[in-house]
Amino acid sequence: MTESLRILVVDDEERMRQLLVKLLQRAGYEVEQAPCGREALALTRVQVFDLVLTDIRMPEMDGMQLLRLLREERPETAVVMMTAFGSVDSAVQAMKEGAYHYISKPFQMDEVLIVVERVVVEGRLRRELASMRSALQERYGFDNLVGKSKPMRVVYDLVERVAPSTATVLIQGRSGTGKELVARAIHVNSPRHDQPFVPVNCSAIPADLLESELFGHVKGSFTGAVADRKGLFMDADGGTLFLDEIGDMGSDLQAKLLRVLQDHKIRPVGGTKEVVVDVRLVAATNQILEQRVADGAFREDLFFRLNVIPIQLPELRQRAEDIPLLVDHFLVRYGAQSAGHKRISHDAMAALVRYSWPGNVRELENAVERASVLCRDDEIGLADLPDNVRSEQGGRLARLVQDEASLAEVERDYVELVLERHEGNQTRAAEILGIDRRTLYRKLQSWREGSVSGREH
Ligand SMILES: Nc1ncnc2c1ncn2[C@@H]1O[C@H](COP(=O)(O)OP(=O)(O)OP(=O)(O)O)[C@@H](O)[C@H]1O
Ligand SMILES: [Mg+2]
């Protein structure tokens, strides 16, 4: 059951190299060879190997150097070191630097085959796991996040990568794009998941109260402070604090927050002692924070501190292909409360996909909930959708009807509409339009050259 595994044998000793090559070839592997690290590296840059089996001591570039470079350039390639008998130190060092295994010389041929077999089995497991995972993501998205469009996959990937760390994350996106959902996904996938997740909406709390909300206060520090109170930072100790609408935070508090990020200490309002807190900060805003910085409304130093890892959420209209998935998701959610969930007519779905969704996923969710409630039978139709969704229905196309436009104009307008919806992705647009990509290209080209007359922009 040998899969065709590619192995590179690196040894300056000709006889040893040939021996290994023959052994591995006979076992059914594809084998290449190199007499030194430098040549080996050159080979790995043009071919992908599953395994590099390398001697440590070689002239020019030795095995350790090769190992280090391979870890950087080809992290998916397993490296097995061959060490001289008695040089345990270098073997240990190699393992520390990320070698997969070592074999000490002189070795039994069986030993080599066993190690290689292990690389095969583990590689297969890893691939299976990866494909299972991506299959799941294809279908469902990530946690409660629905969507399989490219921009959403980028988001899932970022969430996965930042979750294990304590790095501060800044989530930016228009209203209703799912910022809070992403913040929760980060928390849930982090080692802090069994500690509190504390959301704070900075724009909902009056500026003069926000400080004591966040940092707490001591009794008597202001009118109304009748007892000591722990702040939200303390509540989130060990967990994650989600500072929503951070763009609205006043400049006083911005300065204080910056200090917390630097020192990991807070000072309750009216208090004299500082308290150490262990809080992972995730912030979100629907404003363009760079612009707020440029306008002098947001501190640049705080922006940099928060923006360690930026996550930008796409608007719904930039990922229209996710709309049917989201609609199904919400139909199930809102159907579960009544008896079974509803279907949706083809027309209604088409209208939902075409609408521009200024309120993004939240607006879509509301529309689906409303339709689920309003709809009398078990299929949601156009009539059950909100007026604005129905009236925007091809707003541009409707205008063409009114103008009594020619077929060529309608065609051009529709093609442009589809392209806009898919961020100029011609392959996708051609698919939707049901024409060949080259045909689409030719059409665009001819319009650009102005061969269709009768319409000015
Ligand atoms: N990718 C998604 N999959 C499923 N549901 C989503 C997704 N994105 C957003 N939602 C839903 O849409 C609604 C709005 O999401 P959320 O509150 O996270 O957005 P937001 O960006 O924080 O909005 P705002 O800027 O208005 O605070 C929620 O009910 C959420 O469950
Ligand atoms: Mg929000």
Image: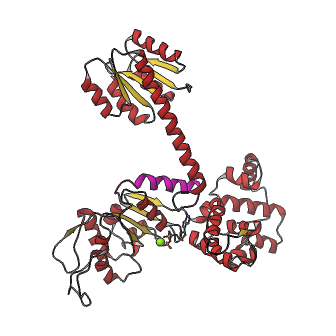
Residue 59 in the image, given as x and y percentages of width and height: 32, 17
Residue 28 in the image, given as x and y percentages of width and height: 55, 19
Given residues 66 and 366, the one toward you in this image is 366
Residue at position x 26%, y 72% in the image: 256
Residue at position x 64%, y 55% in the image: 424
Q: Residue furthest bottom?
A: 223
User: Would you say 436 lies left or right of 317 here?
Assistant: right
Residue at position x 59%, y 52% in the image: 138
Residue 153 part of the magenta segment: yes
Residue 222 part of the magenta segment: no
Q: For the image shown, how many numbered marks are present on the structure?
A: 0
Q: Is residue 269 above or below residue 151?
A: below
Q: Quadrant of the image for the C terminus?
A: bottom right
- The scheme the figure's colours follow is secondary structure
Given residues 35 and 250, the one toward you in this image is 35
Q: Residue furthest top?
A: 15
User: Would you say 336 lies left or right of 74 here?
Assistant: right
- Quarter where residue 349 is shown: bottom right
Q: Residue furthest left?
A: 272
Q: Quadrant of the image for the N terminus?
A: top right
Residue 134 visible: yes
> Which region of the structure is painted magenta?
146-166
Q: Residue furthest front?
A: 339
Q: Please tell me whether the stretch drawn in magenta is mainly helix, strand or loop.
A: helix
Q: Is residue 168 above or below residue 26?
A: below
Residue 206 in the image, given as x and y percentages of width and height: 36, 83
Given residues 146 and 173, the one toward you in this image is 146
Residue 408 in the image, given as x and y percentages of width and height: 81, 60
User: Would you say 121 lies left or right of 93 here?
Assistant: right
Residue 66 visible: no
